[in-house]
Amino acid sequence: MAKFLPQLIIFSVLSFSAINVFSAENDGYARTLDRKLFGLKKKEKLTHFQLYWHDIYSGTHPTVVPIVSPPSNSSGTLFGELSMIDDPLTEGPELSSKLIGKAQGLYGSAAQEEAVLLMAMNFVFMEGKYNGSTISILGRNKVFSAVWEMPVIGGSGLFRFARGYVQARTHKFDTKTGDATVQHNVYVLHY
């Protein structure tokens, strides 16, 4: 036993040190971690993106598809309708401008007396240094507002632990087809 005592002492010290690195506080089910273990820097960056979201109902390749119809006795707001999206995100307002990524998710009519949508979507980047990273957005879209705001609730890749907000405004809306182009100004804090 005496011959293993130095190794036992070293193992105990290293184990205790590792516990301290992983956990400053421990409630049994949760613990505080050292941010360095996840490659997180002390200082966050604030990044601004200006993107154009193209919601296309018309044509042979729509990017939005209704998946749940409202009940037949629904209000004039189509309360209860739910649509799935795979909308292009472009650098400029024209659909032909550079494709930056996709807005993938869903939205539904969430109010009986006003045009309000609940939006749940990921902005999936397909270009440049953010390629493969996502920003997750969940929020209220008051359709006829000049500008509406939605929170950024997270992300993946370069946007792990992201938070922030989106200011959106309708750039173009076709009342016959329902097609819309919406400018999104995204402000994201990330590491």
Image (tube, helix red, strand yellow):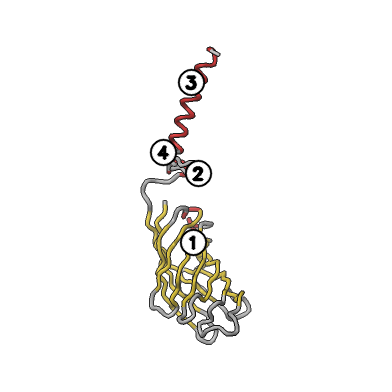
Q: Where is residue 92, by image quadrant?
A: bottom left
Helix, strand, or loop for circle 2?
Answer: loop
Which sits earlier in the primary sequence, circle 1 or circle 2? 2
- Label 2: few (<14), some or many (≥20) within 10 Å? few
- The answer for how far apart the CA atoms under marks 2 and 4 are is 14 Å
Helix, strand, or loop for circle 4?
Answer: loop
* Residue 99 vertical position relative to residue 158 in the rendered view, above or below: below
Which sits earlier in the primary sequence, circle 3 or circle 4? 3
Farthest residue to the right: give it: 60
Q: Amino acid at mark 2?
A: Tyr
Residue placed at 46% from the left, 71% from the top?
52
Helix, strand, or loop for circle 1?
Answer: strand
Q: Where is residue 72, by image quadrant?
A: bottom right
- The residue carrying mark 1 is 136
- The residue carrying mark 3 is 9
Residues under numbered marks 1 and 4 in contact, where contact means CB atoms less than 8 Å apart: no
- The residue carrying mark 2 is 29
Q: Amino acid at mark 1?
A: Ser
Helix, strand, or loop for circle 3?
Answer: helix
